[in-house]
Image (cartoon, rainbow, N blue to C red):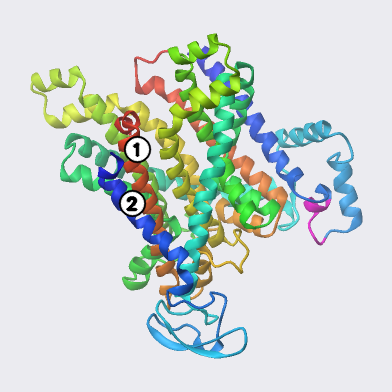
C-alpha cells in the first residue's frame, strides 16, 4: 500500500513539472520583453531592470526556469503589479469564496446526480431514464452564464427569494453565507450533475447485469438494498473517477459563475488578471488551479482501495 | 444508415437551419450589426424605431429582438453572431482534430516518441481548458485566429489519446502486419491503413469539440477576453446586456437561446453519430 502511494506520488511529479513548464512558457510566448510585461505598463526603467536581474532574465532560459521553480517551491509566486501585493497572498485572500462555492457545488451535485443515475439504470429505457438522458444533453449545452441569468431572473428578481449577487463571508453568519451561495452552486452544478448522472447510470447499468445481482434478488433482498449495496457499491470506481475529472469543468465554471454573481474568489481574480494583463497573477492562479486539480485526482486514485476491496496495491 | 437515426435528423436539420441563417443573414431583414442610433436605445422587442446608416441617413427599422443601450439592433447582431459561432466551432474542431490525429498517430506508432509526447499531453490536460484558452488570448490579444488556436489547444490531448489508443489496437491487426512485412513505408501505413479505420470515432469526437468550442468562445467573449469588440458575437451581446439585465432581460435572452440551441443541436447530432457510427462507444456511455 505504502509502496503504491509512493509510486503514484512519483508518477504525479512529471505532470506537475510539465504544467510548470507550460505556465512558465506563457510569458515567453507573449510578444515583447518579459521583464516589461511582468512589471506592468506603468513601471519605470529601474523597476524593469530590477525584475530582470531578480529573475535572471538576462541569463539562459534553463537558468531562468530554475530560478522560477526555486521561487515557486519556496512559495513565492511573484508580485502582482495590478494589485500591488504578493500573488501567493492574493490567492490566499481569494481562496475562501471559491472553496465554499466548489465544495457546496460538489456536495449538491453528487447528492442529486447519483440517485438520479441509479433510478435511471434501474428503470433502464423507461420514461425516467429518457428524461434524465435528455436533461443531461441539455445540461451540457446550456452555457453556465445563460443559466445563471435565467435563475437570477426567476428566483431573485421575479420571486425575490435569494440575493441577486454578492458574497458573505462564513464568519458573518452561516445563513447569509449560504443564501448567497445557493444560486451560484445550483448554476454551477447543472453541467456536473449531467456528467455524473450519465456515468452513474452507465456503470450501475453494467453492474446490474452481473450474476451477483440475480443472486441477491433470488435470495429475496429488498430492491433498494440490491440497488445500493450490490449495484451502486460495485459501480463506485467509475463514478468517483468522473467526479475527479469533472473538477476541471468545475474550475472553468467557477471562472464564469463568480463573474456573473460578483463573488470575489479565484475565478473572478483570474478574469480580472487577464483583463489587466497581470501576468504574475495569471501564472499563479493557473498553477494553483492545475496543481489542485492534479492533487485532488491523486487523492481520488488512492481512494479506490477503500471503494473496491478487490483493488490491492 | 446514418439518416435513419432521429438524433442525427433533428440535430442535423437544426444545424442546417442555423447555417442558412448564418449565410443569409444580410437578407433576413437585418441591418449592419454595427449601426446604432441614439434615438433607439433600449427598445423592447418588436418596437419600431430608426437607425442611422454610415452615410448619416435615418432608416425606419423594426427591432424584432429589441435594441441595446447604444441603440443597436439585437436581431441583426444575433443573426450575424451565428456566423462567428459556427465558424469558430468548425475551425476549432478541424484544428484540434488535425493536430491531435498527427500526434496520436506518431505517439501510437513510434514507441520512442510515445512517452515524451503523452507526458506533455498529460500536462496540458492538467490545466482546465478555459484557463488555457483565456491565458493564451491574454497573451496574443483577441483575433479570430488566436481565439481558434487558444480554444483548440486544450482539446488536442483528448484527440491524441483517442487516436493513440485506436492505433495501438489497429497496429496489431493482420493487415497492418502484412503491410509492414511487404516493406510499406511508415507514413503510408499510418495514413493509408490505420487512419481510415479511425474515422468514425474521430467524427464523433469532432462534433463534441465543435460544441464545446462554441461554448468556450461565447464564454471568452462574455468575459471580455474574446474576439475584438467590433465583431458581434453572442457572448459579447450578452456581456453588453449585463448592466441592464434587471430592466431589459431580452439583451441576454435572445443570444442565450441561440447559443444554447446551437450547442444542443451539435451535441444531439454527435450523440446520433455516435450511436450509428460507433456502436462500441455508444454502449459504454
From this view, report whether residue A230 is shown above or below residue B177. Answer: below
- Picture quadrant of residue B117: top right
Label annotation for residue A41? none
Q: Which residues are magenta?
A: A36-42
| Residue A313 visible, this angle | no
**Percent coordinates x, y for residue A158 in the rendering:** 33, 72
* A219 with respect to A306 (left or right): left
- Which sits in the foreground, A56 or B23? B23
| Residue B266 visible, this angle | yes
Pointer 2 and pointer 1: residues touching (CB < 8 Å)?
no
* B276 with respect to A129 (left or right): right
Give the residue drawn at x 31%, y 31%.
Answer: B279
- Both marks 2 and 1 on one chain: yes
Residue B153 on the magenta segment: no
Give the residue drawn at x 53%, y 71%.
Answer: B240
Q: Which residue is mark 1?
A: B274
Kindly state the secondary structure of the residue where label 1 is placed: helix
Residue A38 on the magenta segment: yes
- Which sits in the foreground, B107 or B16? B16
Q: Which residue is mark 2?
A: B11
Q: In the rendered structure, the residue with mark 1 lies on which chain? A: B
Amino acid at each position: 500500500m505504502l509502496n503504491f502511494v509512493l509510486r503514484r506520488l512519483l508518477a504525479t511529479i512529471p505532470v506537475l513539472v510539465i504544467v510548470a513548464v507550460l505556465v512558465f512558457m506563457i510569458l515567453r510566448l507573449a510578444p515583447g520583453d518579459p521583464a516589461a510585461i511582468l512589471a506592468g505598463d506603468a513601471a519605470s526603467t529601474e523597476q524593469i531592470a530590477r525584475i530582470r536581474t531578480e529573475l535572471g532574465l538576462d541569463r539562459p532560459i534553463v537558468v531562468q526556469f530554475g530560478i522560477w521553480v526555486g521561487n515557486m517551491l519556496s512559495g513565492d509566486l511573484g508580485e502582482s503589479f495590478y494589485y500591488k501585493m504578493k500573488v501567493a497572498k492574493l490567492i490566499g485572500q481569494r481562496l475562501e469564496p471559491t472553496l465554499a462555492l466548489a465544495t457546496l457545488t460538489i456536495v449538491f451535485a453528487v447528492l442529486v446526480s447519483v440517485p438520479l443515475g441509479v433510478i435511471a439504470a434501474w428503470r433502464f429505457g423507461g420514461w425516467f431514464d429518457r428524461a434524465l438522458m435528455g436533461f443531461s444533453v441539455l445540461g451540457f449545452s446550456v452555457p453556465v452564464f445563460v443559466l445563471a441569468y435565467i435563475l437570477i431572473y426567476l428566483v431573485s428578481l421575479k420571486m425575490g427569494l435569494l440575493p441577486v449577487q454578492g458574497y458573505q463571508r462564513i464568519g458573518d453568519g452561516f445563513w447569509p453565507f449560504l443564501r448567497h451561495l445557493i444560486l451560484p452552486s445550483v448554476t454551477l452544478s447543472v453541467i456536473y450533475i449531467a456528467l455524473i448522472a450519465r456515468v452513474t447510470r452507465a456503470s450501475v447499468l453494467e453492474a446490474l447485469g452481473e450474476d451477483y445481482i440475480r443472486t441477491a434478488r433470488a435470495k429475496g433482498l429488498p430492491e433498494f438494498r440490491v440497488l445500493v449495496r450490490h449495484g451502486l457499491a460495485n459501480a463506485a470506481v467509475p463514478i468517483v473517477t468522473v467526479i475527479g475529472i469533472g473538477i476541471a469543468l468545475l474550475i472553468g465554471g467557477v471562472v464564469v459563475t463568480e463573474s456573473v454573481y460578483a463573488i470575489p474568489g479565484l475565478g473572478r481574480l483570474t478574469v480580472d488578471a487577464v483583463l489587466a494583463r497581470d501576468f504574475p497573477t495569471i501564472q499563479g492562479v493557473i498553477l494553483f488551479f492545475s496543481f489542485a486539480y492534479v492533487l485532488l485526482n491523486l487523492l481520488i486514485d488512492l481512494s479506490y482501495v477503500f471503494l473496491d476491496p478487490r483493488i490491492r496495491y | 444508415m446514418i439518416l435513419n437515426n432521429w438524433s442525427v435528423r433533428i440535430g442535423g436539420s437544426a444545424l442546417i437551419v442555423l447555417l442558412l441563417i448564418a449565410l443569409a443573414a444580410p437578407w433576413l431583414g437585418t441591418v449592419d450589426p454595427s449601426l446604432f442610433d441614439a434615438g433607439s436605445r433600449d427598445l423592447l422587442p418588436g418596437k419600431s424605431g430608426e437607425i442611422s446608416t454610415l452615410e448619416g441617413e435615418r432608416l425606419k427599422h423594426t427591432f424584432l429582438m429589441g435594441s441595446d443601450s447604444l441603440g443597436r439592433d439585437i436581431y441583426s447582431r444575433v443573426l450575424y453572431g451565428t456566423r462567428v459561432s459556427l465558424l469558430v466551432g468548425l475551425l476549432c474542431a478541424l484544428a484540434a482534430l488535425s493536430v491531435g490525429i498527427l500526434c496520436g498517430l506518431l505517439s501510437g506508432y513510434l514507441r520512442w516518441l510515445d512517452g515524451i509526447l503523452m507526458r506533455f499531453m498529460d500536462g496540458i490536460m492538467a490545466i482546465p481548458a478555459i484557463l488555457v484558452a483565456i491565458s493564451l488570448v491574454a497573451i496574443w490579444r483577441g483575433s479570430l485566429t488566436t481565439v481558434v488556436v487558444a480554444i483548440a489547444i486544450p482539446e488536442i490531448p483528448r484527440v491524441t489519446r483517442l487516436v493513440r489508443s485506436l492505433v495501438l489496437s489497429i497496429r496489431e491487426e493482420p493487415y497492418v502486419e502484412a503491410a509492414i512485412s511487404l516493406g510499406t513505408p511508415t507514413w503510408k501505413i499510418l495514413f493509408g491503413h490505420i487512419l481510415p479505420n479511425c474515422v468514425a470515432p474521430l467524427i464523433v469526437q469532432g462534433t463534441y469539440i465543435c460544441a464545446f468550442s462554441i461554448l468556450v468562445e461565447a464564454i471568452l467573449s462574455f468575459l471580455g477576453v474574446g474576439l475584438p469588440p467590433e465583431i458581434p458575437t453572442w457572448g459579447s451581446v450578452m456581456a453588453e446586456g449585463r448592466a441592464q439585465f434587471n430592466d431589459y432581460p431580452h439583451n441576454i435572452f435572445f443570444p442565450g437561446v441561440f447559443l444554447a440551441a446551437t450547442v444542443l443541436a451539435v451535441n444531439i447530432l454527435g450523440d446520433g453519430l455516435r450511436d450509428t457510427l460507433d456502436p462500441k462507444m455508444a454502449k459504454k456511455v
